[in-house]
Amino acid sequence: MVKHIVMIDFKEENKKENMQKVKTMLEALVEQVPTLISMEVGINFSQEERAMDLSLYTTFDDQAGLEAYATHPAHLEVLSFIKSVATGSKVSDYIV
């Protein structure tokens, strides 16, 4: 099984609205991307300086499933919006 974790920081302009919109858009991918087994999206509440605004935790059967997700048109649409409202992100992919 492959785990794919992403953490995103958002621009200050419309931050709360954009975080909620991204959360909703990401969660909709579960029904749209066949290789996506599960997804959990959380909006951060920590006040620590090192904290990031939103975290995404997804699972796939294998690396090919993750690659299919990465290039799926529905995911690319969400990614395009994220890039327009985010200041940066971090990713970790691993096999268990």
Image (tube, rainbow, N blue to C red):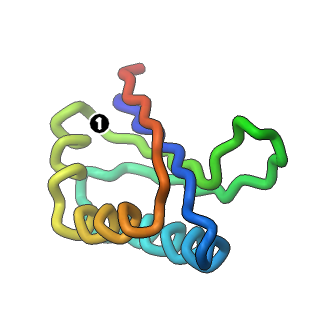
Picture mark count = 1
Residue 67: horizontal and vertical position, in percent? 18, 42
Identified at 47% across, 60% down, the residue is 86
**Residue 47 place in picture, x, y as percent:** 84, 47
| Label 1 packing within 10 angstroms: few (<14), some (14-19), many (20+) | some
SS state under label 1: loop
At 56% from the left edge and 64% from the top edge, which residue is drawn? 11
x, y percent for residue 38? 44, 51
Above or below residue 75? Residue 69 is above
Residue placed most toward the observer, 40 or 70: 70
- Check disc 1 and report the residue beneath it: 61
Residue that lies at the very extreme toward the top in this rendered image: 96
Amino acid of disc 1: Asp
Horizontal relation, residue 26 to residue 13: left or right: left
Quadrant including the N terminus: top left
Q: Quadrant of residue 83?
A: bottom left
Q: Quadrant of the C terminus?
A: top left
Residue 6 in the figure: left or right of residue 71: right
> Residue at left 81%, top 40%?
48
- Rendered position, 69 above or below 95: below
Q: Nearer the viewer, residue 51 or 3?
A: 51
Q: Quadrant of residue 82?
A: bottom left
The residue shown at (36%, 71%) is 81
Q: Position of residue 36 (x, y in %)?
A: 32, 52
Q: Eyeballing the image, is 86 above or below 51? A: below
